[in-house]
Image: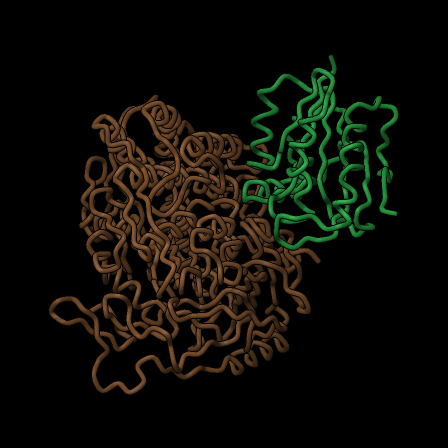
């Protein structure tokens, strides 16, 4: 039984039902945050060494995120945290009333980095609702496109956004003794990445000038070149539509992609070993670094990359086709996988708004009490949720974020690309084993030769879950992504050789009645779902739940912190500083950035009449906070 | 032959803020001297521009144009020669972060491109102050009225001798 908090059980056929005798199964009591806030205020008033430290905006993240902390600089502890998504995202509102076929193109604009994942999730949502099933090559090409998209996303994070936190420029300032030691410590994987010492790696992570930083910029081009061969345009592809793809692919297209893909074989080997060496070095220097960004390993992932011969777009069969994906859907609770079934994952999700700038919707009379398979769903589930923005002032005890608080089984779950590695490794159900080998405790990945020889690489389920493991996991996710792309490239070539070159299935948009659909997919940072309701041919409700909404969530109705908040609360302050004026907060920033925050997916549009200010743009990853 | 690159900058479907990419096709229809290239520099952002300019033959002049919000009278058209001054490295890093995470901004493009040394010394900017920044495909009345003058201004900025272009922003046109 995978649910501990929601009163949901399963019969012998795996169908969920609400436990008998529970009168209001989804009812809950809200816990006030007032006592906690008063306690913190009192501590601040009585202790000079306890300081509020605000990161506003958090830099080197995509979009607008502000983070409030109260820090005890004497005890080197974080006492309080609040994660604030400072802008409202209005895509749900924009999509309401529209032709469903607009959804892929409009929702794509939710992000200027990962627009394609929204297009695809939207396409999947409508494929379920219409219904329509793409032909195998359409699915294969979509997989390939969406593997290549992460080739823009992950290097960007590792070397341009998070990487500088581990650069010589930062480490020499915040922890000079670590820099001293790094410059003398030999890098274990020098033969692969070419850096003799850890110090050499750190020097090349320097922002703007470091070779790894500049190479990261260059690799975005390789990824984009391969991507546009199928998607026509980056970051908002024009060719992802319900029923498959609207592009013609030939052997020439595949050859153009392979010329780029081959460059990634070496880069992913090098990247994974650079982050292995960095993480292990920090643990070795000071085991306290294992606590930086730590929180229980509670992770959720909706799976990604469909089996072209198993995916049928139906909700009825999603448990089966979900488990045949390259990335197994699943939920990890306290490090243990509790399900790999998409239906169990879906029915356990609820979104709460007690501390978010939204009005409640009607939960007494939810439109849907079950999913299409007859499993119970909550009034707080996305198929029942409505987006009703309610701008207001900031209050730590009331409302302070435009992000909602999604919970699975009423727990704060983390969305992470590492959750893909974890679910594949622990689940063992993933059938695509040409290059991948789940062992139960690890994922072995066999990377072909390029300039570097072929290598067997292994990501191991970590003993602790923290900022360093998030980054290491993201580096290994690049290896996974490369191999998924290669596997799909080979399948696509086979299909083309057999003359099976159809990439799209025609469909009729329903004009009458009600249809619902869900898209279970993933972004560069993990979990992504869209849920749609269509009434008489128009979208009557559309809900987007992104990875950064999970991660940036404010406290839930029970006062439990969201993942950023919890991870920062658990972070020890290991930085060297002589006074509060010289304190930089690098450990906190490493923690927040390790989640690869992407706030444009989480929020958008400006907030008139509040303390919180203005977005720069509405339709892409472009939100800055300006005062 | 003087090589000139004219680049429109802006988001699509953001009303007045989309003026850069939207009038690129109109500019391309005009008769130009040999050596003038016109394109939308919004797609892919500054990093794509860096890759493009590093591979191209050097240009003698760059003209960037688009709508930029600076609290001026809506519809006013400004022109200035970029002095090449760059902010500090922390600010440049922030701009690179914005560039790679999807921000499309004329200022960002200038700064990031400037830092990576892709612009010619002779770089000119033509800006129009937007009025309507909502989302959608149409311009405000004010910007619609300014379009012919904006096209003339871009052409002027591309072909005028260098000594006629000032580093201080000057108003080339304003609504009546």
User: In which quadrant will I find the C terminus of chain A?
Assistant: bottom right
Residue A476, percent from left and from top = 34, 41
Q: In this view, does A561 lie to the left or right of B44?
A: left
Q: Is residue A547 left or right of residue A447?
A: right
Which residue is drawn at the image coordinates 68% and 36% (left, top)? B23
Q: Nearer the viewer, residue A70 or A298?
A: A298
Residue B87, percent from left and from top = 72, 40
Q: Which of B32 and A593 is in front in this view?
A: B32
Color used for chain B?
A: green
Color used for chain A?
A: brown
Residue A113, percent from left and from top = 49, 44
User: In which quadrant will I find the N terminus of chain A?
Assistant: bottom left
Q: Residue furthest top?
A: B1
Q: Nearer the viewer, residue A337 or B104?
A: B104
Please identify the quarter of the rendering in which residue B171 is found: top right
Which residue is drawn at the image coordinates 33% and 37% (left, top)? A141
Which residue is drawn at the image coordinates 36% and 48% (left, top)? A242
Q: Which residue lies furthest to the front in this view?
A: A512
Please identify the quarter of the rendering in which residue A438 is found: top left
Q: In this view, does A151 lie above or below A93?
A: above
């Amino acid at each position: 039984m995978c649910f501990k908090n929601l009163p949901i059980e399963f019969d012998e056929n795996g169908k969920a039902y609400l436990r008998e005798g529970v009168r209001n199964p989804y009812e809950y009591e809200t816990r006030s945050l007032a006592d906690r806030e008063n306690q913190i205020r009192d501590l601040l008033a009585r202790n000079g060494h306890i300081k509020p430290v605000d990161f506003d905006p958090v830099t080197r993240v995509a979009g607008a995120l502000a983070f409030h902390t109260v820090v005890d600089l004497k005890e080197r502890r974080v006492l309080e945290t609040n994660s604030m998504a400072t802008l409202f995202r209005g895509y749900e509102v924009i999509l309401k009333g529209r032709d469903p076929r607009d959804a892929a193109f409009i929702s794509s604009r939710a992000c200027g980095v990962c627009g394609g994942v929204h297009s695809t999730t939207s396409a999947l949502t409508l494929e379920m609702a219409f219904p329509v099933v793409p032909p195998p090559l359409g699915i294969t090409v979509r997989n390939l496109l969406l593997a290549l998209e992460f080739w823009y996303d992950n290097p960007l994070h590792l070397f341009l956004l998070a990487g500088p936190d581990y650069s010589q420029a930062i480490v020499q300032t915040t922890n000079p003794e670590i820099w001293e030691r790094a410059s003398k410590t030999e890098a274990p994987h020098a033969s692969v990445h070419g850096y003799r010492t850890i110090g050499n790696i750190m020097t090349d992570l320097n922002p703007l000038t470091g070779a790894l930083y500049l190479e990261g910029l260059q690799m975005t081009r390789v990824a984009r070149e391969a991507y546009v061969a199928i998607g026509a345009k980056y970051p908002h592809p024009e060719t992802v539509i319900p029923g498959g793809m609207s592009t013609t692919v030939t052997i020439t297209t595949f050859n153009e992609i392979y010329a780029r893909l081959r460059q990634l074989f070496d880069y992913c080997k090098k990247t994974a070993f650079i982050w292995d060496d960095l993480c292990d070095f920090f643990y070795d220097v000071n085991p306290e670094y294992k606590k930086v960004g730590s929180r229980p390993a509670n992770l959720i992932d909706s799976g990604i990359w469909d089996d072209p011969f198993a995916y049928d777009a139906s909700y009825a069969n999603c448990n089966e086709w979900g488990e045949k994906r390259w990335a197994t859907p699943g939920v990890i609770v306290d490090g243990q996988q509790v399900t790999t079934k998409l239906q169990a994952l879906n029915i356990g999700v609820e979104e709460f708004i007690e501390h978010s700038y939204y009005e409640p919707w009607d939960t007494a009379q939810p439109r849907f009490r079950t999913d299409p398979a007859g499993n119970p769903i909550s009034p707080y589930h996305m198929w029942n949720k409505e987006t009703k923005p309610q701008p207001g002032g900031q209050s730590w005890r009331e409302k302070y974020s435009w992000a909602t608080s999604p919970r699975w089984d009423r727990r704060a779950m983390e969305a992470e690309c590492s959750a893909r590695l974890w679910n594949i490794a622990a689940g063992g159900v993933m059938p695509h084993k040409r290059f991948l080998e789940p062992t139960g405790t690890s994922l072995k990945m066999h990377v072909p030769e390029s300039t570097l020889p072929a290598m067997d690489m292994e990501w191991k389920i970590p003993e602790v879950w923290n900022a360093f493991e998030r980054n290491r996991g993201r580096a290994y996710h690049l290896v996974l992504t490369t191999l998924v792309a290669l596997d799909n490239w080979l399948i696509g070539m086979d299909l083309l050789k057999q003359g099976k070159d159809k990439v799209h299935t025609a469909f009729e948009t329903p004009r009458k009645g009600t249809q619902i659909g869900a898209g279970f997919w993933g972004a560069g940072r993990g979990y992504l779902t869209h849920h749609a309701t269509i009434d008489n041919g128009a979208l009557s409700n559309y809900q987007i739940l992104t990875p950064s909404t999970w991660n940036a969530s404010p406290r839930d109705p029970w006062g439990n912190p969201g993942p950023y908040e919890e991870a920062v609360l658990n972070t020890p302050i290991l930085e060297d500083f002589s006074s509060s004026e010289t304190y930089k907060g690098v450990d906190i920033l490493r923690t927040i950035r390790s989640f690869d925050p992407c706030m444009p997916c989480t929020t958008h549009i400006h907030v008139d009449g509040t303390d919180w200010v203005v977005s720069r743009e509405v339709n892409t990853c472009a939100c800055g906070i300006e005062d | 032959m003087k090589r000139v690159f004219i680049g429109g900058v802006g988001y699509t479907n953001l009303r007045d803020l989309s003026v850069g990419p939207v009038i690129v096709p109109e500019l391309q229809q005009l008769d130009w001297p040999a050596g003038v290239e016109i394109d939308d520099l919004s797609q892919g952002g500054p990093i794509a521009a860096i890759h493009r300019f590093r591979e191209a033959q050097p240009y003698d002049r760059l003209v960037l144009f688009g709508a930029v919000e600076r609290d001026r009278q809506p519809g006013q058209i400004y022109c200035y020669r970029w002095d090449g001054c760059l902010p500090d490295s922390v600010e440049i890093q922030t701009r690179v972060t914005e560039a790679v995470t999807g921000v499309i901004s004329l200022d960002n493009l200038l700064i990031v491109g400037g830092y990576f040394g892709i612009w010619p010394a002779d770089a000119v900017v033509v800006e129009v102050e937007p009025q309507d920044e909502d989302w959608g495909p149409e311009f405000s009345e004010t910007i619609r009225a300014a379009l012919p003058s904006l096209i003339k201004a871009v052409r002027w900025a591309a072909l005028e001798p260098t000594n006629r272009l000032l580093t201080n922003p000057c108003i080339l046109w304003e609504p009546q």
